[in-house]
Amino acid sequence: MNDILSNGVHDDIQHDDMDRVLRGYFRRQMPNPWPAAKATALAQPTPRRRSWLSSYGRLALAASILLGVMGYLALSSLFPEQEGPGLNLDRTIGSKQRITPLKAQPLPTQRERTANGVEVESSGWIIPGKGTIINVKQR
């Protein structure tokens, strides 16, 4: 066992001899010349009949896709349509109606610092009978 694992010159010669002995043995065991393969008749494929079972599976798949599309369309009709893509800067978030300057009185713009030291600017409108809107921007 140790002779096989060591890498000495003597061991390389033994490995070459062993390789030659094994190659000669296996070549003697194989037929020479190699026999030719026998030709076999090709099998004709039999036509498959479609079963009702496979048709039912396809029908069930089509029905489930149809139900999914119909459900999507039904749910999407319940939600309001969105306006065009991009930012809509004309509207105030959460407002139901536009404020006209004739009804509202502007509040003076003020600049202040928050407790964290951030400078902010506040402005707004007083709407008679409705309340006050205050806008705050970070500067």
Image (spheres, grey):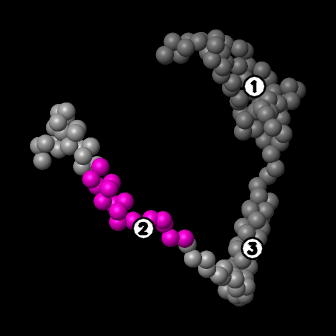
SS for dot 2 = loop
Whether residue 35 appears in magenta in the rendering, the answer is yes
Q: CA distance from mark 2 to mark 3?
A: 60 Å
Taking the image as shown, residue 127 lies to the left or right of residue 114, namely right
52 vs 3, nearest the viewer: 3
**Amino acid of disc 2:** Pro
Taking the image as shown, residue 38 lies to the left or right of residue 105, namely left
Q: Quadrant of residue 58?
A: bottom right
Taking the image as shown, residue 4 lies to the left or right of residue 113, namely left
| Residue for point 18% across, 39% down | 11
Residue 86: % across, % down: 79, 34
**Amino acid of disc 1:** Trp
Residue 57: % across, % down: 68, 79
Which residue lies under the disc numbered 2?
31
Residue 18: % across, % down: 24, 49
Pointer 2 local density, CA inside 10 Å: few below 14, some 14–19, many at least 20: few
Figure check: 83 above or below 128: below
Magenta span of residues: 20-36
Whether residue 24 appears in magenta in the rendering, the answer is yes
State whether residue 86 appears in this view: yes
Q: Earlier in the sequence, mark 2 or mark 1?
A: 2
Which residue lies under the disc numbered 3?
62
Q: Earlier in the sequence, mark 2 or mark 3?
A: 2
Pointer 3 local density, CA inside 10 Å: few below 14, some 14–19, many at least 20: few
Which marked residue is nearer to the observer: mark 2 or mark 3? 2
Which residue lies under the disc numbered 1?
125
**Amino acid of disc 3:** Ala
Residue 2: % across, % down: 11, 43
Figure check: 133 above or below 83: above
Q: CA distance from mark 3 to mark 1?
A: 58 Å
